[in-house]
Image (tube, rainbow, N blue to C red):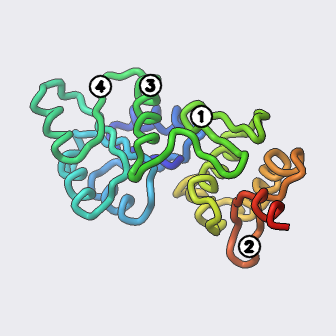
C-alpha cells in the first residue's frame, strides 16, 4: 500500500512517516497543498492523509481540486478543528473520513485500513487468485489453506499482483508501490524480492503462478487453469 501524507507540522509528519513505514506501507510526505496536488497528479495512492491547516492551500481546497481532477483515492483528513461545521466541510469537499488532533496512531491505522477496503474502486475484503488468498486488513496470506508468512515488502508486492491478476506489472510499478517516491537504490532489488516471493508462494507448493514476462515485468496468474487445460 502506498500512502501520501500531507502535513506541515514536522513532528507529526515524522511520526506518521515512521509509524506507517513500520507497518509496511510505502510513504511519501509533502508539507504543502501545492505539492500535494502535484504528487497526487503524478502518482497513484491507496490513501491520502491530509491535514486541514496547511501554509498555502488548506486541506479542504486540496481535496476539492483533486476530486475535480478525477482522483478518487480515499482521503483521511486530519484537523485540530472540532466544530461540526468543519467536519461537514471536509466531507463535502470529498474526504472519506476525518480524525481530530490529537489522535492515537492505532486509531489512524484502523481508519486507514477501513478506507483501503473501500478504495477508489470496488475492492473485495479478501483477494483471490486461484487458491492463493490474501486478507489485506488482517495482513494474512494462505495458499491451499496453508498460511504463508511474508515480510512487509513481499506482502506489498503480492498485494499489487493480486489486485491486478493476469496483468503484467512492471518493475517500476512494483518499486513505486512497495518502496516510495524517494527510492534511489538499485532497481534490481525487485528481482531479488520476486525470488523471495516465489520461494514462499510457488516453490513449496510445486506451483509456477508468478511469471516473468520478458522485457515487460511480471504477472500473477491462476496456474491451475493451464494445468487443467493440459
Q: Is residue 189 above or below residue 89?
A: below
> Mark 3 and mark 2 in contact (Cβ < 8 Å)?
no
Name the residue that disc number 2 marks.
213
Which of discs 1 and 2 lies nearer the camera? The answer is 2
Give coordinates of residue 145: x percent, y percent: 76, 35
User: Which residue is rendered at x = 36% and y = 46% of the image?
Assistant: 74
Residue furthest out toward the front: 229
Q: Which residue is mark 3?
A: 105
Q: Earlier in the sequence, mark 1 or mark 3?
A: 1
Sequence order check, earlier mark of 1 and 4: 1
Q: Secondary structure at mark 4?
A: loop
Label 3 to label 4: alpha-carbon separation: 11 Å
Residues at marks 2 and 3, CA–CA distance in whole angstroms: 40 Å
> Which residue in the protein does label 1 denote?
22
For the point 70% across and 60% down, which residue is it? Answer: 221
Tell which circle, 2 or 3, labels the residue nearer the N-terminal end.
3
Amino acid at each position: 500500500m502506498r500512502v501520501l501524507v500531507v502535513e506541515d507540522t514536522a513532528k507529526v509528519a515524522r511520526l506518521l512517516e515512521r509509524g506507517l513505514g513500520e507497518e509496511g506501507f510505502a510513504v511519501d510526505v509533502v508539507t504543502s497543498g501545492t505539492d500535494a496536488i502535484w504528487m497526487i497528479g503524478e502518482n497513484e495512492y491507496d490513501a491520502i492523509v491530509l491535514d486541514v491547516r496547511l501554509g498555502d492551500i488548506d486541506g479542504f481546497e486540496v481535496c476539492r481540486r483533486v476530486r475535480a481532477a478525477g482522483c478518487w483515492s480515499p482521503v483521511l483528513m486530519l484537523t485540530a478543528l472540532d466544530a461540526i461545521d468543519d467536519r461537514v466541510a471536509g466531507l463535502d469537499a470529498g474526504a472519506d473520513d476525518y480524525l481530530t488532533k490529537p489522535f492515537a496512531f492505532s486509531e489512524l491505522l484502523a481508519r486507514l485500513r477501513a478506507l483501503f477496503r473501500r478504495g477508489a474502486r470496488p475492492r473485495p475484503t479478501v483477494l483471490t487468485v486461484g487458491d492463493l488468498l490474501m486478507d489485506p486488513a488482517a495482513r494474512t496470506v494462505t495458499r491451499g489453506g496453508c498460511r504463508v508468512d511474508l515480510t512487509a515488502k513481499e506482502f506489498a508486492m503480492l498485494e499489487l499482483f493480486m489486485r491486478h491478476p493476469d496483468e503484467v506489472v512492471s518493475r517500476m510499478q512494483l518499486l513505486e508501490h512497495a518502496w516510495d517516491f524517494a527510492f534511489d537504490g538499485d532497481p534490481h532489488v525487485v528481482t531479488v524480492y520476486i525470488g523471495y516471493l516465489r520461494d514462499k508462494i510457488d516453490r513449496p507448493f510445486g506451483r509456477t503462478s508468478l511469471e516473468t514476462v520478458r522485457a515487460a515485468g511480471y504477472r500473477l496468474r491462476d496456474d491451475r487453469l493451464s494445468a487443467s487445460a493440459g
